[in-house]
Amino acid sequence: MENMIVNIVIGALPILLAITVHEAAHGYAARHFGDMTAERLGRISLNPLRHIDPFGTIILPVMSLVFGGILFGWAKPVPVNFNRLRHPKQDMLWVAAAGPLSNFAMAIMWATLLGLSPHLPPYFGMFLALTSQIGISINIVLMVINLIPIPPLDGGRIMVSLLPMHLAIKFQQLEQYSMLILVAFFILLTQTPFGSKVISPLIHFFEMMIVRFFV
C-alpha cells in the first residue's frame, strides 16, 4: 500500500503534464492553421481539469503504476474541425503531429532534469530523479503509441494527410469504428506478443536514446 501511494505521488505530475500538454498542443496547432474550435471551448490550456478523462487520465495510469506494464493513458480529445483549416489535408498532418512532438520535447525536458538531479540535495534529488524517469517513460509511450497509423490515433490522421485523396477518404471512414479499433488495439497491445515484442522494445530504444543524448 505504501509503495502504491509513493508511485502515485511520484507519477502524478509527469503523467498529468504529458497528457495535458499533448492535448493543448493539438489545439494550439489547430488555431495556428485556422481552426478556432479548441480555443473557443477553452481547450488550449495547461489546466489539467480542462483535459481530464476520468478513466484514461486517472484510473488507467494509476493501474499501470500499481500493477506494472506499459504506462499508458489519455485525455479528452481536443475538438478539431479539420474543414476549417486553411489547407485541411496538408495542415491535418501538423495538427496531428503536434501532440507526439510535444511529448518528445517533454521527454527531453525530463531527461535534462534527470541529469541535474545528482547535483541537488539528496532527498529532493532522488524525488526529482524518480519523477523524471516516469516523465521520460510516459512521454515516450504517448509519442510511440500515438504515431501508430490507425484511426483515431494521431498516426492515423497523419496517414490520412499523406495518402492520395481517394485512399485518404476510404482510410478516414474507418474512424467511425474508432472505439472498436481502440479496444482491439488495447487487446493486441496487452494480450499478444505485439506489445512485448514490438512496442516495448521501440519504447525502450527511444528512452535509451533520450537518456544517452540529454542526461
Image: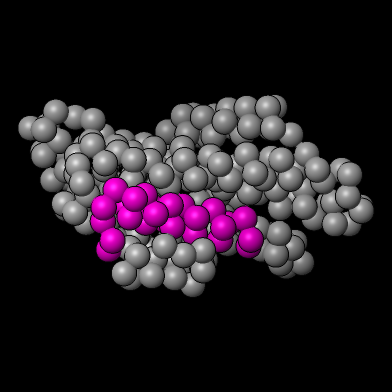
Percent x, y of residue 115: 78, 39
Secondary structure mainly formed by the magenta segment: helix
The structure residue drawn at horizontal position 46% and vertical position 65%, both measured from the top left corner, is 45
Q: Is residue 187 visible?
A: no
Residue 214 painted magenta:
no
Query: How is the structure coloured here?
Result: one colour
Q: Nearer the viewer, residue 33 or 43?
A: 33
Which quadrant of the figure contains the N terminus? bottom right
Residue 14 painted magenta:
yes
Above or below, 64 relative to 200? below
From the viewer's perspective, tell me whether residue 41 is left or right of residue 141.
Answer: left
From the viewer's perspective, tell me whether residue 202 is left or right of residue 170.
Answer: right
For residue 14, what is the image quadrant? bottom right
Residue projecting furthest to the left: 166
Q: Is residue 44 visible?
A: yes
From the viewer's perspective, tell me whether residue 75 is left or right of residue 215.
Answer: left
Which quadrant of the figure contains the C terminus? top right
Q: Nearer the viewer, residue 1 or 31?
A: 31
Percent x, y of residue 103: 52, 45
For residue 161, what is the image quadrant? top left
> Residues in magenta?
12-37
The structure residue drawn at horizontal position 69% and vertical position 40%, both measured from the top left corner, is 111
The structure residue drawn at horizontal position 46% and vertical position 29%, both measured from the top left corner, is 198
Above or below, 120 relative to 2? above
Q: Nearer the viewer, residue 9 or 85?
A: 85
The structure residue drawn at horizontal position 31% and vertical position 69%, both measured from the top left corner, is 40
Above or below, 85 relative to 39? above
Percent x, y of residue 190: 45, 44
Above or below, 211 relative to 24? above
**Number of marks drawn:** 0
Percent x, y of residue 118: 87, 43
